[in-house]
Image (cartoon, grey):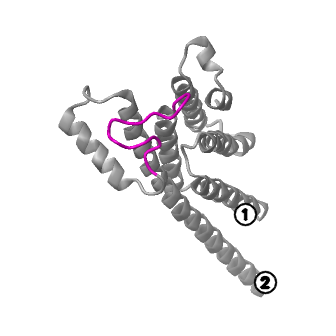
Amino acid sequence: MVVVLLTPFSESFGVPRHILGVTLFLAAALTDFLDGYFARRRNQVSKLGQLLDPLADKLLISAALIALVDNHLAPAWAVVIIIGREFAVTGLRSIAATDGVVIAASRMGKLKMAAQVFAVSLLIVSSTSGNPPVSNLGMPFPAIAFWTVPELRAAWQHLFSSGPFAISWSDWQVLLYTAGRAMLWVVVLSAFYSMFGYFRAFYQAAQLREAEEKREGVKG
């Protein structure tokens, strides 16, 4: 996927890089989901799988986001926050595991993963080869530097007023790009929120363990 997104490898075979790139990314995300689904359904969850599954998630998302930063489609600050959060939560869960405490994946963490897949897919599809195009919407591509909502609203208003067949692929790129950047905000916010939830769960488990040790000490 990284080779496809950062080199003209796929185009030498007549396949646009954004098509092959998003296909590889979604295929990897789907197989990752099916792996966990069938493992739980067939009661074949293993310690090795519990170790490799989150690592595969993080490697896939990190590789895609870093490639998008290189293509100037994702801001580096947001990618640093997302990947840094992954390091922090992984380290926390490792420390908890050494104390016999299992911190299960939270619903917000799963929502963050789904938002990541959606955001990355939109940004990959909006990528282009060669010189960045200028949209008929009057906005250069990439369309925004920091915030997304005003540009996204203007783009969608143009789409609904002109119709989907009246705008060019460059316009669709802007629409997809602004939607992807908006979703990236959802990922960043959910990353903070889910990280807070993991640390709170760890703190509560540590307090419970300490209270149990004190009770055992008093009984002894």
Image quadrant in which the N terminus is located: top right
Q: Is residue 167 left or right of residue 25?
A: left
Q: Is residue 77 left or right of residue 220?
A: left
Amino acid type of the residue that numbered disc 1 sits on in the rendered structure: Ala
Say whether residue 170 is left or right of residue 158: right
- In the rendered image, the residue lying farthest to the bottom is 218
The residue singled out by tag 2 in the image is 217
Residue 46 location in percent, x, y?
71, 40
Image coordinates for residue 134, horizontal then vertical, percent: 42, 36
First in sequence: mark 1 or mark 2? 1
As measured in the structure, the alpha-carbon distance from the residue carrying label 1 to the one carrying label 2 is 22 Å
Vertical placement of 114 versus 100: above or below? above
Tell me if mark 2 has few (under 14), some (14-19) or many (20+) residues whose alpha carbon lies within 10 angstroms of its own: few
The numbered dot on residue 96 is 1
Q: Are marks 1 and 2 in contact (CB under 8 Å)?
A: no
**Residue 149 falls in image quadrant:** bottom left
Element at label 2: helix
Q: Is residue 141 magenta?
A: yes
Please report the bounds of the magenta region as a residue range.
128-144
Image location of residue 21, percent across then percent down: 57, 28
Residue 147 numbered mark, or none:
none
* Residue 89, x across and y down, in percent: 66, 59
| Prevalent SS, magenta region | loop
> Residue placed farthest to the left in the image?
161
Which dot, 1 or 2, sits closer to the camera? 1
Camera-nearest residue between 16 and 87: 16
Frontmost residue, 85 versus 53: 85
**What residue do we see at 25% from left, 28% from top?**
166
Q: Residues within 10 Å of mark 1 (few under 14, many from 20)?
A: some
